[in-house]
Amino acid sequence: MSDKEVILTQDGLKKLEEELENLKSVKRREVAERIKIAIGYGDISENSEYEDAKNEQAFIEGRIITLEKMLRNARIINNDEIDTNTVSIGSTVIVEDLEFGDTMEYTIVGTAESNPLQNRISNESPVGKAILGKQKGTIVEVNVPAGIIQYKIVDIKK
């Protein structure tokens, strides 16, 4: 992972800081205890509990490094920076699928906090790229694996 700027909303920053704190204060201790218990079982060369705990420890340490780097390179989008005339990172956008008439609401976020299941889409995703910088009433075309979808930007909110 390069030292690329990580764009975060205030909410995204809080979540990453909470995850980092939990990994450092709780998860590290839990996995260290699991390793200690597994070592107590004797021969660690064929001890699956020890192996699992060591793998989890490696994952936790890797995630801590990743989170620390993300937070070091974070640029926070404040609510007052969000323009309701133009789609930007932090905007909540209502779009209408012109073929089917469905409306969807997306919040545009940086890749670090995107979660399509919560309708938080990355500014680098196909839909995010297509609507970024556009204004209410604009029709955009989004290339997706199934073809091209046309969306009309119905509303932009903070």
Image (cartoon, rainbow, N blue to C red):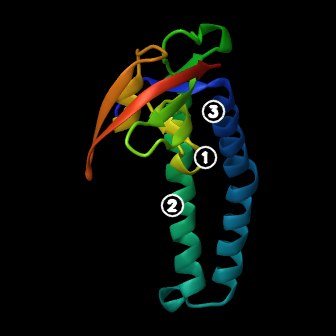
Which residue is tagged 2? 58
Q: Residue at x 51, y 47 (%)?
A: 116
- Secondary structure found at label 2: helix
Residue type of the residue flagged with mark 2: Ala
Q: Residues within 10 Å of mark 2 (few under 14, many from 20)?
A: few
Residue 85 drawn above or below residue 40: above
Residue 110 drawn above or below residue 45: above
Of the two numbered discs 2 and 3 on the same chain, state the one appearing first in sequence: 3
Q: Which mark is residue 12?
A: 3
Residue type of the residue flagged with mark 1: Gln
In the rendered image, residue 109, in percent from the top left (x then y), is placed at 52, 30
Residue type of the residue flagged with mark 3: Gly
Report the mark closest to the observer, 2 or 3: 3
The quadrant holding residue 52 is bottom right
The quadrant holding residue 156 is top right
Report the mark closest to the observer, 1 or 2: 1
Which residue is tagged 1? 118
In the rendered image, the quadrant that contains the N terminus is top left
- Secondary structure found at label 1: helix
In the rendered image, the quadrant that contains the C terminus is top right
Residue 89 drawn above or below residue 97: above
Q: Residue at x 73, y 64 (%)?
A: 30
The answer for how far apart the CA atoms under marks 1 and 2 are is 29 Å
